[in-house]
Image: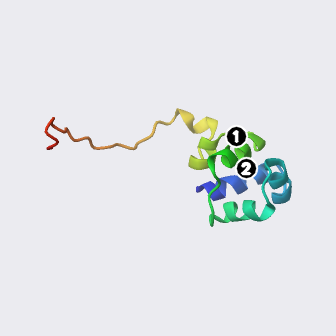
Amino acid sequence: MSLADNIRRYRERKNITQKELAETVGITQQALSLFEQGVKVPGIITAVDIAKTLDTTVEQLVDGQTAENKNVKSTRHFETQEVKKDGST
């Protein structure tokens, strides 16, 4: 799920309206609506405030993982390439 979907999902779980969440966080209802539509992305401070108000974390809003899913390790792998002192690979 996307950040937008997760903000909406957590808000609905708390049974609060967009207007209520926006007022608590200190943003407009229109801004929150744009976040939930995925048109805009909240700044980090706003994201933290939203997460706190929704009793979750920014990480959970971003990746959608719940505490129950935290035991599952990420399957993301990154290739590494050795770089020599002269900058060549």
Coordinates of residue 64 in the picture (x, y in percent): 60, 48
Q: Secondary structure at mark 1?
A: loop
Q: Secondary structure at mark 2?
A: helix
Could you say which quadrant of the image residue 88 lies in?
A: top left
Amino acid type, label 2: Tyr
| Residue located at (27% from left, 44% from top) | 79
Q: Nearer the viewer, residue 56 or 87?
A: 87
The front one of 34 and 59 is 34
**Amino acid tagged 1:** Thr
Quadrant assignment for the C terminus = top left
Image quadrant holding the N terminus, namely bottom right
- Residue 31 image point, x, y percent: 73, 62
Q: Is residue 32 above or below residue 80?
A: below
Task: Point out the tag, 2 or 1, that comes first from the N-terminus.
Answer: 2
Left or right of 17? Residue 77 is left
Left-right relation of 40 to 81: right
Residue 49 position, x and y percent, is: 73, 44
Q: Residue at x 63, y 35 (%)?
A: 67
Residue wearing tag 2:
10
Colouring used for the render: rainbow
Answer few, some or many: residues within 10 Å of disc 1's Cα (few below 14, many 20 plus, some between 14 and 19). some
Q: Please name the residue shown 17% across and 42% down the image.
A: 87
The quarter holding residue 81 reads top left
Label 2 CA crowd tier, 10 Å (few <14, some 14–19, many 20+) = many
**In the orientation shown, which residue stands out farthest toward the front?**
86
Task: Confirm or deny contact between disc 2 and disc 1 (CB under 8 A).
Answer: yes
Cα separation between marks 2 and 1: 8 Å
User: What residue is rendered at 79% in x and 60% in y?
Assistant: 28
Name the disc covering residue 13, or none.
Answer: none
In this view, 27 is above or below 38:
above
Q: Is residue 66 above or below residue 33?
A: above
**Residue under label 1:** 56
